[in-house]
Amino acid sequence: MKLGTALLVVCTALMVWIVTALPAYSATRHVVLLFGERPELPALAVLQADLVRTLSSNSTDSVEIYNESMDLSRFGSNNYQLFLRDVLQRKYADKKIDVAIAIYPASIEFLLNYGSVVFPGTPIVFCAIDKTELGNRVLPAHVRGILLKREFAPTVEIALSLHPKTERAVVVAGTSDFYKRLLELARIDFGFYESRLDFQYLTTLPLQDLLTELSRLPPRTLVFYTTVFRDGAGETFVPREVVERVSAAANAPTYGFFDQFVGRGLVGGNVNSLSAHGVEAGKLALEVLSGTEASRPQVAEVPTNKILFDWRQLQRWGITESKLPAGSEIRFRETSAWELYKLQILAITAAIFAQATLIAWLLLERQYRHRAERRARETFAELTHVNRMATAGELSAAIAHEIRQPITGMVTMANAALRWLSRDKPEIGRARDVLNKVVAAGHQASDVITNVHGLFGKDTQEKTSTDLNKLIQSVLSVVSVDLRKHNIETQANLSDQLPPVVGNEVQLQQVILNLVMNAIESMDSAEPRVLSVKSETTEHNGVHVSIADTGKGIDIADLNRVFKPMFTTKARGMGMGLAICKSIIESHHGRIWVTAGAPRGSIFQFELPANGTKH
């Protein structure tokens, strides 16, 4: 029993230790940030960002942060503060707050008055308050803070060192209660320079009148901007937007006292950094959360100023960097491309030189290539002409028959007309009829010659709007004798709505002629013999032509080879006809292919874009 009792005591103690130790590692700390103004205002946004970053990144515990805004510049009545007290009391009644952070004088004033009601037993940390705003107040033990050290004289001193001939100083400030107090602090520091400078305070003008006044300042004047939240007409503004307008309108350099305005038009100065102040406030809050705050004073005035300038404004007012105080920080510097990218520029220059050499070589090669292409085009043109002449040779007998037939008829009819005219009583009427027939036969022969000339004349390479149906009909007319000779039935199904194409008539006629002649040859030993020619419009408004035969067809293994140069299945063929057809169609931005016919034969097809169709 004694051993069992001892084990029970040890286990119980171990469990108690584990339970008490766990919160140290798993607790979530709850922090409330109470802002006297809206936290989205630029100055407070900067402070808040660094305060929250310090809390979140340096705490060993999880930190949950709540933001509350009093917005006293817009809601400043006593009744409002009582209402706010009751709202916050109810809101956080069931939430244990580990520390409340007051930002701006109004918020610490509120917590000193009502903190025991809203956050009973909660430590309070304050920031963004100077010692004059705190006064001689004796703070409770649970209240600690970081004081701002607002100084205005150092900026005036810097401005005068950069502009030693200055005679006047114009001070721009707002009219709200907080900014009035700020101006009072500034006037104390400005008092040391009143024997040297004529001070003018512009605080009661509407913003537009203020800007007009600043645009016509006399020479040897400097502008000092505290901050403007509300102008002389009572209209509220965002202070950093006002400083931009002030700087843009003023015909004299503008200096200031807060870092959030550098980059908004200020030349610079010895400015208070709310960013650094937020970091210090975050550190104090962490010490309070960890219970180590006793190692520092209850209220500490931590220097957070920095000497800061805007490079762009230095350039605007002709201020050289050598005149700036030692340790100055210059922001927004527009460094030269050489300073930023010296190595890259050297590398790019070397690359450009190499590229220039390469380009020169490529241009030379391009000239050689263009000459070669020109020679290739000339050779191809000659080859296509030779191909046409070879086709003409094949058709020579049929062409001769087509021409001989009307000429023979013309001779016969002319002899008859002579006989009728030589009689004692000339038969003029019969002679006239016969001579009309002679004329008609002459036109027929002329048409044959015209078609042949169109097919086998020299190619001019010119492209015009072309009617493919007309070309098909002219080809069929030329080969009509050959079709009759081989007892081939012709079926032409040509669309009446076929749009024109932009093409070279001679080249396109050659394509059609080559395909028709191939079809005729393929049906040499076939029965029945039918040549089908069809034209139609494609769904993309192009033109589709098919030439089908009932011949022996093409071996499936050769379907993808028939358009290659030098490939032929003919005993005496050169293998260039279909290759030339493919080249011509592709030069017209079209495509050509062949499929097996049903039940036999082949179907050669090609498509061309219609006139105006984009491909």
Image (cartoon, helix red, strand yellow):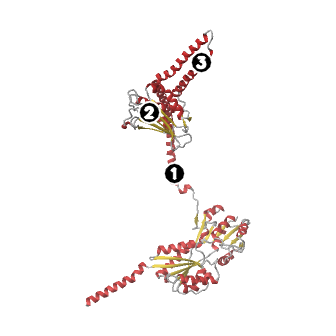
Nearer-N-terminus badge (1/2)? 1
Amino acid on which the number 1 mark rests in the picture: Leu
Residue for badge 2:
578
Which one is in front, 58 or 504?
Answer: 504
Q: Is residue 43 something that shows in the picture?
A: yes
Q: Is residue 20 left or right of residue 258?
A: left
Q: Is residue 507 something that shows in the picture?
A: no
Amino acid on which the number 3 mark rests in the picture: Leu
Look at discs 2 and 3 and give the one toward the viewer: 3
Residue for badge 3:
435
Crowding near pointer 1: few (<14 within 10 Å), some, many (20+)? few
| Image coordinates for residue 293, horizontal then vertical, percent | 49, 82
Label 1, label 2: how far apart the Cα atoms are:
56 Å
As drawn, which residue projects farthest toward the top? 424
Residue for badge 1:
346
SS label for mark 3: helix
Nearer-N-terminus badge (2/3)? 3
